[in-house]
Image (cartoon, helix red, strand yellow):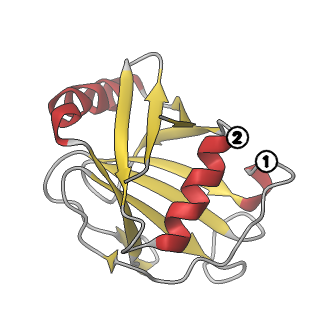
Amino acid sequence: MNHIRLTEPASGLSARCALLEREAPQSCAFLQDLAARRASFEAMHAIWTGPEISVPMPSGLLPADMPQPAIPEENATSYPSAGDIVLAYLPAGSTLGLPPGAFYDIGLFYGPGGRLLMPFGWIKANVCARIVEEDLAKIQADCRTIRRNGTCQITVEPV
């Protein structure tokens, strides 16, 4: 099983994530591409979805030479569990209020009660990785630190 790591230096977040390649192959390939590039994005604690650190990635912020595939539903849910890493994909023009182009979002769910109800309605996202069990307790504390501190910078890295 392949892994990626999500890091954020101010909180000490360093989440090893086991990729669910059988269940969500295209989502995992997208995350592996980001990890190979050590891509970094502004992130924040979510407002609507509960215990989530959201890493929004409008297509214009992806690395310039990175493919921007349409990601189909695979292992999709509207109710992520603690430890789930989800990838949401919204095609260009599908949702009012988003930047131009396709929109991707990594959700790091660290506690129970996650739900993908947005101001524009329910969405589904692909559960494509899980935080490794031995990292989860520390990650929960780190995510609470991010919630208190506000916006942060999350990097997707290889393990």
Q: Nearer the viewer, mark 2 or mark 1?
A: 2
- Which residue is painted at 21% across and 26% down in the image? 138
Q: Is the residue marked by circle 2 packed among few (<14), some (14-19), or many (20+) residues within 10 Å?
A: some
Instruction: Give residue 127's quadrant in the image.
Output: bottom left
Label 1: state its secondary structure: loop
Marks 2 and 1 close (CB-CB < 8 Å): yes
Residue 118 in sight in this render: no
Q: Earlier in the sequence, mark 2 or mark 1?
A: 2
Reply above or below: 63 against 29.
above
Q: Which residue is mark 2?
A: 37
Reply above or below: 142 against 61.
above
Reply above or below: 5 against 3.
above
Where is residue 80? Give x, y as percent.
Answer: 25, 64
- Which residue is painted at 63% across and 69% down in the image? 97
Q: In the drawing, does residue 91 fall left or right of residue 44?
A: right
Where is residue 51? Give x, y as percent.
Answer: 25, 48
- Which residue is painted at 58% across and 63% down in the image? 29
Q: How many marks?
A: 2
Instruction: Give residue 11's quadrant in the image.
Output: top left
Q: Which mark is residue 63?
A: 1
